[in-house]
Amino acid sequence: MSAILVWAEITDGRVKKPVLEALTAARAWAESAGLPVWAAALGKEIPDAVLSTLAEYGAEKVIRILSPALEPLVNSAYARALAHLMKEKGLSYAVLPQTYDGKAIAPLLAIEADAALLSGITQAPEKEGTGWKARRIAFSNKAIEWVYTEYPRVIATLRTNSVVPAKAPKPLATEEVSFTPEAKDLRLQPTGVEKVATDKVPLTEAEIVVSAGRGLKGPENWGMVEELARVLGAATACSKPVADVGWRPHHEHVGQTGIQISPNLYIAIGISGAIQHLAGVASSKNIVVINNDPEAPFFKVADYGIVGDAFEVVPRLTEAIKRYKEQHAH
Ligand SMILES: Cc1cc2nc3c(=O)[nH]c(=O)nc-3n(C[C@H](O)[C@H](O)[C@H](O)COP(=O)(O)OP(=O)(O)OC[C@H]3O[C@@H](n4cnc5c(N)ncnc54)[C@H](O)[C@@H]3O)c2cc1C
């Protein structure tokens, strides 16, 4: 029996949130294709909690590919392992989360599996005629592009935060498929990872992002930004010049030349809203702008705007959120 396969990216022994989004989108795709959803979990060993999470989000079967050579993750080996699995099981469709690794594995997998690649789609592909139509964001958020394929095999990557993950519990069923990476799959090997970002919530996966720019005047003023982010359970981000002058680390820089994000809520404090900044954040579902210049371009794309001095507005906003949370704690 065929199925739509979802690659279950695992970090620190847990399924990444974009995988739950991919499973949710895959279910919608599977419904129009008349197929079940399967998940593929690769590594040295797969924790039970991973398997049960995948079943909880609608995987009717979880296929494990176990090999010591699959840890740490090497993109080429993962692509070949997934292609091997698709071939062995006769699968035509797969969804990968559009994470750093998902983005790197998908094109290699598309080549290995001789499939069309629908990259960065924002919802499940829709049936059209004898093929599939998919929607994606193009030209740094300036356009929406529809792509169509009639190719018999399709690999899709789902843009993070495009789909709200929803549970659809299935009884856990697992199977093992054997695959041993060859030397050519392991040409490049990660030899160690030194974490520089200490954020609790990774920026690309965060549902809420609190971001600040040059309007904050200096790095010593970021305490209030971090406090607002803490109260909201948000990740922090910044504009490019702020990272360029070293007020904030480079991994927080969002925009055309930085990280592209689409959280549910993006709060921009003291950021003018230059086109290059908007290129990385304009697909956020809700944008709140705090700026003391009513003519700041950011207000044109804002869902909510506060014209005011960030040094007054941000602490008051944080206090109001704290009060609200206390009142609604039970
Ligand atoms: C090729 C290229 C690529 C680029 N890529 C990126 C990118 O990826 N990301 C990016 O961010 N930029 C990028 N830029 C830079 C971009 O053009 C802007 O210069 C930059 O985004 C401006 O940053 P900013 O909004 O923090 O600063 P400014 O433009 O200086 O804006 C500061 C804002 O703070 C407001 N403000 C001042 N004081 C207060 C206060 N007390 N309270 C509230 N508001 C206040 C001001 O009204 C102003 O709107 C790129 C530029 C180029 C040429």
Image (spheres, rainbow, N blue to C red):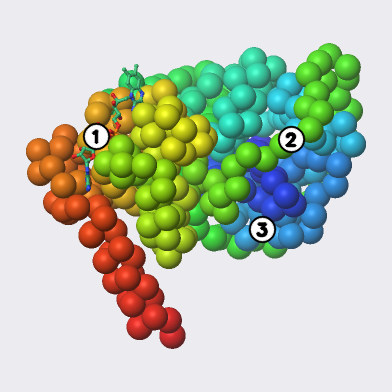
Quadrant where ligand 1 appears: top left
- Between 48 and 268, the residue placed more toward the observer is 268
Residue 106 image-quadrant placement: top right
Q: Give the residue at mark 3.
A: 53
Position of residue 59 measured from the top left corner of the image (x, y, whole percent): 64, 51
Identify the residue at image location x=37%, y=25%. Answer: 256
With respect to residue 325, does 34 lie above or below? above
Q: Give the residue at mark 2.
A: 193
The numbered mark, 2 or 3, whose residue comes first in the sequence reads: 3
Identify the residue at image location x=41%, y=43%. Answer: 219
Q: Give the residue at mark 1.
A: 273
Label 2, label 1: how far apart the Cα atoms are: 34 Å
Identify the residue at image location x=49%, y=43%. Answer: 203
Residue 143 image-quadrant placement: top left
**Quarter holding the C terminus?**
bottom left
Residue 320 image-quadrant placement: bottom left
With respect to residue 186, does 237 lie above or below? below
Q: Do the residues under discs 2 and 1 have CB atoms within 8 angstroms?
A: no
Instruction: Using the image, tell me which numbered label, if any, was put on residue 220.
Output: none
